[in-house]
Image (cartoon, rainbow, N blue to C red):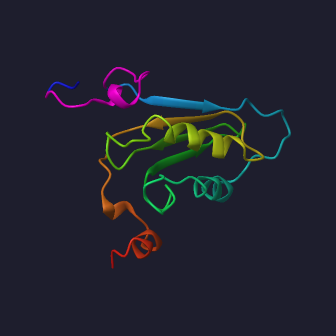
Amino acid sequence: MNEFGGPSLADFMPNAPEPGEPVVARRGSPLDPGVKVADRSEVIQALRTVHDPEIPVNIYDLGLIYDIEIKTNGSVNINMTLTAPACPVAGELPIWVAQAVGDLKGCGEVEVYLVWEPKWTMDLMTDEAKLVLDMF
């Protein structure tokens, strides 16, 4: 329960961190020296394979990915959010993101951070997502 008597993130994620700490999903390991590192477009393509089961739009076009940092050693850090803190797949979605990107050739260790600022709004969706969701 949260301070208002309603459900908190811990109700949906048994291993939820303390308030204010980012949730991290990890996958993979550092690349060997000399291995070609995946580029941003390849990472985005991998992210577009991940969907919230309740929304027929991938998480990238939905605007849930706030930042992608690809390091020279192939490690990838991703900041993402959810449409709502009480999202039924809040505990799983960051793991799915880490798996999708971690399975990509040229990616080393992948870390996914769940952030809440800025708050997600429908304005973050791509035009393609709005079209699929009939929001025009």
How far across and how far down the image is residue 30, in percent?
Answer: 74, 30
- 6 within the magenta span: yes
Q: Residue at x 47, y 52 (%)?
A: 52
Question: Compared with residue 36, is residue 62 higher up or lower down, i.e. above or below?
Answer: below
Question: Compared with residue 131, is residue 41 higher up or lower down, i.e. above or below?
Answer: above
Residue closer to the observer: 107 or 23:
23
Residue closer to the observer: 87 or 106:
87
Q: Quadrant of residue 86?
A: top left
Q: Main secondary structure of the magenta part?
A: loop
Whether residue 32 sits left or right of residue 93 in the image: it is: right
How far across and how far down the image is residue 62, in percent?
Answer: 44, 59
Whether residue 83 sits left or right of residue 73 in the image: it is: left
Whether residue 86 sits left or right of residue 57 in the image: it is: left
- 110 within the magenta span: no
**The residue positioned farthest toward the left in the image shown:** 4
Query: In the rendered image, which quarter contains the C terminus?
Result: bottom left
Q: Which residues are magenta?
A: 4-19
Whether residue 39 sits left or right of residue 56 in the image: it is: right
How far across and how far down the image is residue 53, in percent?
Answer: 48, 53
Q: Residue at x 84, y 41 (%)?
A: 35
Question: Compared with residue 27, is residue 18 higher up or lower down, i.e. above or below?
Answer: above
Query: In the rendered image, which quarter contains the N terminus?
Result: top left
Residue closer to the observer: 2 or 37:
2
